[in-house]
Image (cartoon, rainbow, N blue to C red):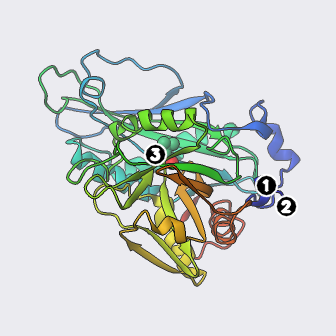
Amino acid sequence: LQASNALRPSASVSASEAIELADIDWDNLGFGLQPTDYMYFMKCDQGGTFSKGELKRFGNIELNPSAGVLNYGQGLFEGLKAYRKDDGNILLFRPEENALRMKTGAERMCMPSPSVEQFVEAVKDTVLANKRWIPPQGKGSLYIRPLLMGSGAVLGLAPAPEYTFLIYVSPVGNYFKEGLAPINLIVESELHRATPGGTGGVKTIGNYAAVLKAQSAAKAKGYSDVLYLDCVHKRYLEEVSSCNIFVVKGNVISTPSIKGTILPGITRKSIIDVARSQGFEVEERLVAVDELLEADEVFCTGTAVVVSPVGSITYLGEKKSYGDGVGAVSQQLYTGLTRLQMGLAEDNMNWTVEL
Ligand code: COI
């Protein structure tokens, strides 16, 4: 197999499924917004209670110019995916985990949040309403983007008086333009993504704005993305702009421990369990940047990136390469995870929710 195809599990589309699909080019999905039919909308009152939400046609939303999210960044987002099974049914992957992470983030950002049940029901309703946009198996997935924002007007710095929970979806393919081929990272030594005591450990929108400068500079130099170091010692790996990082050495797979500055990725957590179930030893600990030189393989994980093999990492002008194609461990873990997500392997972990 070519490196660019090596990670992809087997695909099949039945004729009956094809009939109900939206009319787009399913063979060339990237990670860009494709407007779909419906979005989910739910407001909470001044008492902090979310009432019943509703599906609306997908489109622009109205916000007061003084909304908390626009002025003070009081906002969170989530990301999860729905896959079409080969029998036509739909699988969600661990939606309760996203609901719980949103609750933790809301607490940090002084926002009320929907209950786990409200979140999961809203995700299900939105996915079913946009069913024709879920890619055929093997062509991609439906990316689900829940948002929680301070939509009420504030001028002085304070939590907003009203909040909106919204979900929109888009069919997506591979996140990186490299497709499934290994990506090339550069370590950023000056700019940092998160600080101890800050908000790096929750999925607040500002964390993602904060990485754009280094990311844009890296892309302009031909790198795929940026790998951040801790801001105290400038020595320990944190994460890539949009995903967590893993380092493989022999049978041991190491990843930075969750310590407040690293996003607790649901794919990260799942890959740790998949790797252990496959006999790997997984260590969650401080991982020093020098360990990249000794590593056999490096890969990234995230909802959007899934498991993305790293082909090279450049640090202080020195480039370390990890071979030409997809590493064996990255391949094995990618296959193990995606077969579960697509319903191609038995879900012994009880992670998928079938619609
Ligand atoms: C995801 O993987 O779902 C994320 O939220 C990362 C985002 C930058 C695409």
Q: Is residue 79 visible?
A: no
Write down the residue under mark 3.
Answer: 241
The residue located at (63%, 69%) in the rendering is 333
Residue type pointed to by label 3 = Ser
- Disc 3 under 8 Å from ligand 1? The reply is yes
Quadrant placement of the C terminus: bottom right
Using the image, tell me which numbered label, if any, was put on residue 1: 2
Mark 2 crowdedness (10 Å alpha carbons): few <14, some 14-19, many ≥20:
few
Q: Position of residue 171 (x, y in %)?
A: 65, 39
Horizontal arrangement in the rendering, residue 250 relative to residue 121 (left or right) = right
Residue occupying image coordinates x 22% and y 54%: 196
The residue where tag 1 is placed is 5
**Looking at the image, which residue sits at the far top?**
65
In primary-sequence order, the first of circles 3 and 1 is: 1
Q: Earlier in the sequence, mark 3 or mark 2?
A: 2
- Answer whether labels 1 and 2 touch (C-beta < 8 Å): yes
Q: Is residue 238 above or below residue 336?
A: above
Near-viewer residue (68 or 129): 68
